[in-house]
Amino acid sequence: MEVITVNPRECTRWPLADRSGFEFGDLHSLAEDIKKNGQIEPILARPSQNKDYKYEVITGSRRWKACLEADIPLIAIIKPLTDARAAIAQIKENQKLSLSDYSKGMSYSGLIKGNVLTISELSQSLNCSKAKLHNFLSFAKVPEEVWNAVGNMAKVSSRAAVTIYSLSKKGLPYIQALIEIAEEIKNGAGSNTIEKLVHDAITGGYNSNNEEKLITLTNGKVIASWKKGGLFFSKNVNLDRDKFNAVLIKFFED
């Protein structure tokens, strides 16, 4: 182990690091604090295989980014870690932090997909059941456009992610409904609330089991839905009213 002072510009972030961008917080204040009081705790880094950088930051990404922003030296512990060792170090570090379920889930998925750790090894390292780990892994299975709409996933629980993934598997109308309720998801809506909001977004609260709730093209695009009070067309449908009126008249006269 080697503790040295490095130029933060010579560092890059480990691709499997787990803190999401929305969780970096106020880097300017952190930088000012480091300027005033010094960097109390070193970051953990390893030699980089990227020729453009000397080191790869494993833990302490906020401290690194703050020093980078303030253009001040960075104190680092340098260890020649494998990805598996880096993953274990990151898990231990984050047991002391308040990290979102989303960041944890996306990181765990990356570790498994990258063959860094198996599900059994990761479950053991986290000291959690495989069932609970699978809840976290649901985050990476949700369509990207849903998370893009939500924006900040700090309040989204792993259990909610399971529900969101389950609903998204039902097809495009459900994905569109999840996007419509993105603000509620962002604010921490629970599984039951999400299910109800999606149902209402699709059906408008229309609960008849004997009626068609959605009108969907063969490509999966929803063009209209039956709701309380009648038939409602999607906003992106260009409707020729004269032709549509003629079709309605013919339908009812026949």
Image (cartoon, rainbow, N blue to C red):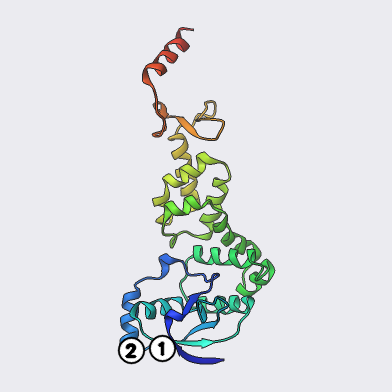
Residue receiving disc 2 = 37
SS at badge 1: loop
Residue 25 lies in quadrant: bottom left
Q: Residue at x 32, y 83 (%)?
A: 33
Q: Amino acid at mark 2?
A: Asn
| x then y, percent, for residue 216 | 52, 31
User: In this image, 252 relative to 91: left or right?
Assistant: left
Q: Residue furthest front?
A: 51
Whether label 2 touches label 1, CB < 8 Å: yes
Binning the other alpha carbons within 10 Å of mark 1 as few (below 14), some (14 to 19) or many (20 upward) gives few
User: In this image, 27 relative to 118: left or right?
Assistant: left
SS at badge 2: helix
Q: Residue at x 30, y 88 (%)?
A: 36
Residue receiving disc 1 = 40
Q: Nearer the viewer, residue 219 or 88?
A: 219
User: In this image, 58 relative to 244: left or right?
Assistant: right
Residue 118 lies in quadrant: bottom right
Q: Nearer the viewer, residue 119 or 24?
A: 24
- Quadrant of image for the N terminus: bottom right
| x then y, percent, for residue 150 | 42, 54
Q: Residue at x 32, y 75 (%)?
A: 28
**Rounded to the nearest whole Å, what is the CA distance between mark 2 and mark 1?**
8 Å
| x then y, percent, for residue 4 | 48, 91
Q: Residue at x 42, y 11 (%)?
A: 249
Q: Amino acid at mark 1?
A: Ile
89, above or below 149, in the image: below
Binning the other alpha carbons within 10 Å of mark 2 as few (below 14), some (14 to 19) or many (20 upward) gives few
Q: Residue furthest top?
A: 253
Q: Which mark is residue 8?
A: none
Residue 34 lies in quadrant: bottom left
